[in-house]
Image (cartoon, helix red, strand yellow):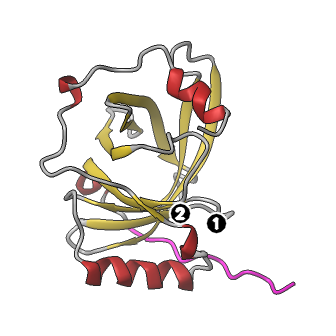
Amino acid sequence: MAKTKEMTVVRGLDLARYMGRWYEIASFPTFFQPKDGRNTRATYNLNDDGTVHVLNETWSGGKRDYIEGTAYKADPNNDEAKFKVKFYLPPFLPIIPVVGNYWVLYLDEDYQYALIGEPTRKSLWILCRQTQMDDEIYNQLLERAKEEGYDVSKLRQTPQHDPPPESDAASTDNKGVWWFKSLLGK
């Protein structure tokens, strides 16, 4: 079996510029996101201690599902954009910490679109500051992902409404039903 090359990760990320809302344009399906999720997005806010508050939202069955967590540099002494993200599960009774990798593989100079992955290549996200992305840029990010060893045929484009829904304009699944469904593969 051929040795997989080390992934190229963004260096010198300006964390303050990276903060704000990012829309999921496409991703590898994961067990922790509803299969019918739409309008999926992440909002990042810098905490006073240098960590990042993470709010991931998606809409499923007309309801808003969300989970909050914290991101932090995997190695504070390295300038690579490699982060750890910690969530507590289940969302309705957050007691079990779950930590994942969040590596910024590509970011345009204006901080408008990004390619996010992790070392096992089992997760991949294409993010954008807008709800839609030009096909040319999307295709460039696909090529970049292929260069990093990803099987881009696994990507699923995420339906986004324009304008996007407001967080407080939808009923919220605060019982964690989506989390149990995700464990059952629904």
Q: Which residue is at the front of the view, 117 or 30?
A: 30
* SS class, disc 1: loop
Q: Main secondary structure of the magenta part?
A: loop
Q: Which residue is at the front of the view, 56 or 173?
A: 173
How many other residues sit within 10 Å of disc 2, few (<14), some (14-19) or many (≥20)? Answer: many
Q: Which residue is at the front of the view, 102 or 81?
A: 102
Residue beneath disc 2: 117
* SS class, disc 2: strand
Task: Please say whether residue 5 is one of the residues in the magenta stretch.
Answer: yes
Query: What's the residue at 35%, 46% (across, down)?
Result: 38
Name the residue furthest right: 1
Quadrant occupied by the N terminus: bottom right
Residue beneath disc 1: 121
Which of the 4 quarters of the picture holds residue 173?
top left
Q: Amino acid at mark 2?
A: Gly
Task: Please say whether residue 115 is one of the residues in the magenta stretch.
Answer: no
Label drawn at residue 89: none
Query: What's the residue at 59%, 61% (across, down)?
Result: 118
Measured along the vertical axis of the image, is residue 54 above or below residue 140? above
Q: Amino acid at mark 1?
A: Arg
Query: What's the residue at 63%, 28% (across, down)?
Result: 97
The magenta region covers 1-12
Q: Is residue 79 visible?
A: no
Marks 2 and 1 in Cβ contact (< 8 Å): yes
Measured along the vertical axis of the image, is residue 93 above or below residue 117? above
Q: Position of residue 87 (x, y in %)?
A: 54, 32
Q: Position of residue 109 (x, y in %)?
A: 24, 75
Quadrant occupied by the C terminus: top right
Q: Which residue is at the front of the view, 186 or 97?
A: 186
Spatial CA span between label 2 and label 1 = 7 Å
